[in-house]
Image (cartoon, rainbow, N blue to C red):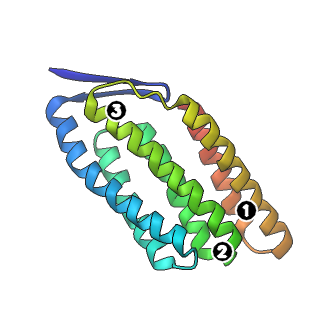
Amino acid sequence: MPFFFEVSLGSIYLEEAEREEFLAQAVIIIEKLQLDIEDFEDDPSDFDKLRSFIKSIDRMILQAKLFDLASVVAFCDTSKVVGQKLIRCDNCELNTIAAGVLADTVDLINKIVQAIGAGESSQIANDYASFQGRLKILSNKFKALEASTQNELSKEASELDSLIAVLDDL
């Protein structure tokens, strides 16, 4: 029996076996993401945890692409870009803010995955609206940092802006 999952950010169609296969891997990856981001929030200078987080995000992207889950891929891509920017940025205050945004992203991904697992619609529109605001604030902070330090974060901030636009289109 096919499974149809409607979400305000797109539609997902998975057969029961595909859904179970995706969920088995997604739950493991999300647990790892949550642990890594909690550790990074505790110590925003621990880039090893951030690298581990990015590696797990890559695994989630592969799983989501395998099952054509565009909304999961979009949130993961955003997390990956933010994480990669932080590795190149040595600003503890910004790292702390970004760690919160990354934790929010993992929470949204988790909500989508839980809804897929339960066979229910995900009601993340309200969560997404507040997340989107925080993401735009972070993008502006990257731009301000670039302006004050003359480093190469402006290109990366533009990349983050384009990912925000992708999320808007879902």
Q: Earlier in the sequence, mark 2 or mark 3?
A: 2
Residue found 49% across the figure and 25% down from its top: 8
Q: Is residue 26 above or below residue 126?
A: below
Relative side of 2 to 13, left or right: left
Residue 162, percent from left and from top:
64, 47
- Residue 1 vertical position relative to residue 169 in the rendered view, above or below: above
Q: Which residue is mark 2?
A: 89
Mark 1 and mark 3: span between their CA atoms? 33 Å
Element type at marker 1? helix
Residues tagged 1 and 2 counted as in contact (Cβ below 8 A):
yes
- Crowd around label 1: few <14 · some 14–19 · many ≥20 (10 Å): many
Binning the other alpha carbons within 10 Å of mark 2 as few (below 14), some (14 to 19) or many (20 upward) gives some
Q: Secondary structure at mark 2?
A: loop
Of the 4 image quadrants, the one containing the N terminus is top left
Query: As drawn, is 22 to the left or to the right of 161?
Result: left
Quickly name the residue at label 1: 142
